[in-house]
Amino acid sequence: MLNKMNIKNLTTFAEVELSFSPGLNVIIGENGSGKSHLLKSAYALISASAEEGRKPNATAPTKTALQKVYADKLINVLRPETLGRLARRKPGRERCELALSFDNQDLDLALNFATTSKSEVVIGDLNKDWQPKAPVFLPTRELLTLYPGFVSIYDNHYLEFDETYRDACLLLGAPALKGPREKKAASLLKPLEDAMGGKVVLDTNGRFYLQMPGQGKVEMPLVAEGLRKLAMLARLIGTGSLLDKGYLFWDEPESNLNPRLTKLVAQMILHLCANGIQVFIATHSLFLLRELEVLSEQKAFKAIPQRFFSLIAGENGAIVEQGDSLEDIQTLVLLDEELNQSERYMQSGV
């Protein structure tokens, strides 16, 4: 589990220490406040470690090898022109510093780079071991309709997609579980499959379909986009990528979902937490926040630890408020705007 993240001079952030929950972590903020940068930076470093550890010739981590590995992953995930462009913009030469702390201290790492850095980081604290499981990053759009041939094209051509798309497609293409773990996944899949009206299948032609009882296979592009997002989640559960002891980073899970499906996504997020996944979501949906709050009072989810982070853009960098509940957050722009809208509605006399 990721316990802490220390940031200094990263894009919109001046200096901040984030303390995470082993269960659900919710990052709230307006567009441009740094939500995606925070998620992607943590994901990039965890993912780079997991990828290196899975290589057939992997040895113990070394600073020499990882200076470029971590830099490349940060560049490929956040897509700056050079690594140094990720450092916070202000007059003079500056250094960006990132550090991750885990419950397993052998995974701890810290690195830094200057505004002039191009493709290598300086490693201050080297992780002694590799991440045991690949993290999952879900972007705001669904990926099942992009999947056919995407990884091959991405690896051989320049595409205007960051590497989280490629990474997620690799996980979506993994074989479905068999045996005891398949039964465990089935209980998580049932509410998703009920909502979709069928099961997600990957055909031999490399295309995803929704297998619907009595209707056969429906091509994924013909399925509503909101349901395709559920299908993507179902596939990752079915392959075991989102089953236990892993990380899920999800940018705006409510995007393109109606309220009914948003309620289901909130339920699935908490089910994943209950099954040992550490979940990080970035959102500006008050509806999703309230739904998570309501569900958390239910017996099945009451024991799940939670942590909330509110990002507010400031002149000297993003300000971060954090607490174990929404009530601990003093500045919640989403709630302020909701209340302002209610007042305008009442005054309009509609």
Image (cartoon, rainbow, N blue to C red):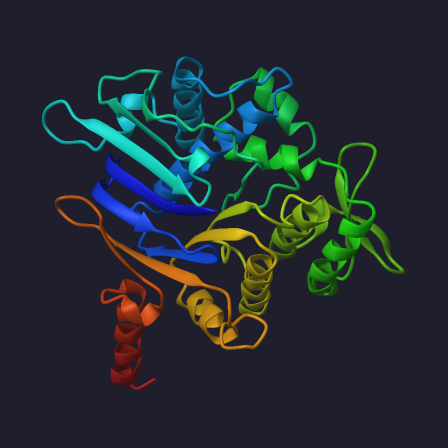
Task: State the residue in front, 36 or 2.
Answer: 2
Q: Where is residue 25 in the image (x, y as percent from the top left)?
A: 42, 56
Q: Which of 276 and 297 is in front in this view?
A: 276
Name which quarter of the figure residue 70 lies in. Answer: top left
* In the image, residue 237 above or below residue 193: above
Q: Is residue 138 above or below residue 302?
A: above
- Residue 224 x, y percent position in the rendering: 65, 55
Question: In the orientation shown, which residue stands out farthest toward the bottom?
Answer: 349
Judge whether residue 161 can be spotted in this image.
no
Tally the numbered discs: 0
Relative to 147, 90 lies left or right = left
Is 34 left or right of 64, judged from the image as shown? Answer: left
Residue 84 sits above or below residue 311 on the image: above
Residue at image point 65% right, 22% down = 152
Q: Where is residue 2 in the image (x, y as percent from the top left)?
A: 43, 45
Measured as percent of width and height from the top left, residue 263 is found at 55, 68
In the image, residue 296 sits, relative to residue 179, either above or below, namely below
Q: Which residue lies furthest to the left in this view?
A: 91
Q: Quadrant of residue 82?
A: top left
Q: Which residue is drawn at 14% across and 22% down?
A: 93
Q: Residue at x 83, y 33 (%)?
A: 204
Name the one closer to the observer, 103 or 134: 103
The residue sitting at 18% across, 31% down in the picture is 89
